[in-house]
Image (cartoon, rainbow, N blue to C red):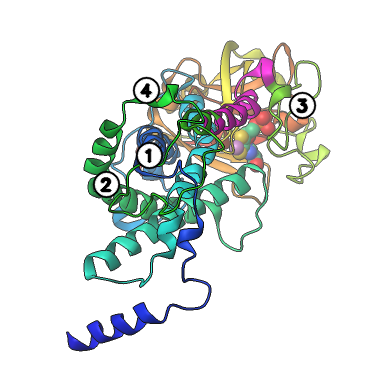
Amino acid sequence: MAFPRRLWRVLDRHPPPGIAGIGRRWRSPLRGPWLTSVYGLVLLVGLPLVIITGLLDYAAYSPQFGQALPRDVGWLRLPPFDWPTRPAWLFRLTQGLHVTLGIMLIPMVLAKLWSVIPKLFDWPPARSLAQVLERLSLLLLVGGILFQIATGLLNIQYAYLFGFDFYTAHYFGAWVFIAAFVAHVALKLPRLVSALRSRPVRAELRTSRAATRAEPPDPDGLVAAQPRPATMTRREALALVGGLSLLLGALTIGQSLDPLRRTALLLPRGRQPGHGPNGFPVNRAAAAAAIRDTDTGPDWRLSLSGGKRPVALDRTQLLALPQHTARLPIACVEGWSTAQTWTGVRLRDLAALAGVPEPASALVRSLEQAGLFNQAVLQANQLRHPDALLALRVNGADLSLDHGYPARVIVPALPGVHCTKWVTDIAFRTRSDA
Ligand SMILES: Nc1nc2c(c(=O)[nH]1)N[C@H]1C(S)=C(S)[C@@H](COP(=O)(O)O)O[C@H]1N2
Ligand SMILES: [Mo]
């Protein structure tokens, strides 16, 4: 042990240029355990919601069918369960909460980091094994959340700048963050409680700027040794960050609420989705999916298989079958969602026509040749639901080519990405081993 101790003494005496005293340069009198703990409390409530809704979003993609990305997550596999079809807005809610709340918490995360920044410059960097472990876990905590925020934001802006797969990165990044978050909470919860108790909230929020003083020195060294006079009260600091959160929320919420669509300034697409019955956001336009007019013209047929012999129907025949109308959302994991009124043939009627009255699953395929989203597997409960449709019309008009003409899938609570457009073929199965 003599060697590390000597090394430590040398490090202590010779800090690298720039590091020495840098921690002392942060002199805000607001910085201290109380403010850190208030931001921490908000994150302690908010982040688990973002984490849980994020994992639910992943579960909604039916990992048990090998549909969710990343495909193979080893022992990080979630317990398999059939994603429910009731209520119809379930995925709209989980996906919307994950994205909106995730965005709203960004100012809180940055404020919390600001409040502990002097600790980044602790010197010497390693006093004890416990401290090394703590710093390592903080690296995963801070690195983890910044990584999740960055990849999430880039994804909803459709900016695939990174050279890796978003879904894989965001899923494994989430688990790194979750592990560090749990460790951090376990370690710091007692300090959070005592810091919050140390200053009554009401009194703190009423303190004037002139009366705003630094907290007494704390063992973590958050409180500045020589604080400068306050330029802001703690109430103002909290209001500033809370106000920024609300502003981000206001600029985001329109992506989930149709009447507020135009206010979703942070949304790159779908803010002005056009007019008329087909005037709602498009994920992938027909041209981008290389759908040719000849494929969707009079020669188009829907093939149904799984029974004794395959059945082929053209659009006129489909329109002659019993039609059902339902108001159902499309919710895209990239953030936006919208509710529309769809009309078409029930999937369970199509299954019966195919000779598979009680299907365990179905593989739906699109005319689209390439692309990750040109097919999907539907579960038994998704096929059975009376509102689960092969839609031919929307809001009283024929589907537009961009919304999947001649026919597209729409199922309650199904993630948008599995609402396959330009359907050409449905293979019903009696066993769910997809
Ligand atoms: N064939 C095909 N179907 C598809 C897609 C696709 O890229 N190809 N995108 C999916 C995604 S991610 C979403 S969110 C919905 C969007 O439907 P909309 O463009 O009609 O709004 O379509 C889904 N169906
Ligand atoms: Mo989507």
Magenta stretch in the rendered image: 240-260
Q: Residue at x 62, y 48 (%)?
A: 154
Residue behind mark 2: 188
Name the spot of residue 253 as percent of width and height, x first. Answer: 60, 25
CA separation in Å, label 2 and label 3: 47 Å
Magenta-span inclusion, residue 255: yes
Query: How far apart in space, not on screen, are marks 4 and 2 (Cα)?
Result: 24 Å
Q: Upstream in the sequence, badge 4 or badge 1?
A: 1
| Residue plotted at (66% across, 13% down) | 320
Q: Which quadrant, please, contains the C terminus?
A: top left
Which of pointers 4 and 2 indicates the residue nearer the eye? 4
Look at label 2 and name its amino acid. Answer: Lys
Badge 1: few (under 14), some or many (20 or more) residues near its Cα, within 10 Å?
many
Q: Which residue appears farthest toward the left when viewing the image?
A: 1
Q: Earlier in the sequence, mark 3 or mark 4?
A: 4
Q: Are marks 2 and 3 in contact (CB under 8 Å)?
A: no
Instruction: Please name the residue that numbered disc 4 is placed on.
Output: 203
Name the residue tied to disc 1: 40
For the residues labelled 1 and 2, say whether their Cβ atoms are less than 8 Å apart: yes
Residue 33, image quadrant: top left
Residue 428 coordinates in the image, percent (x, y)? 46, 34
Find disc 3 in the rendering and name its residue.
Answer: 273
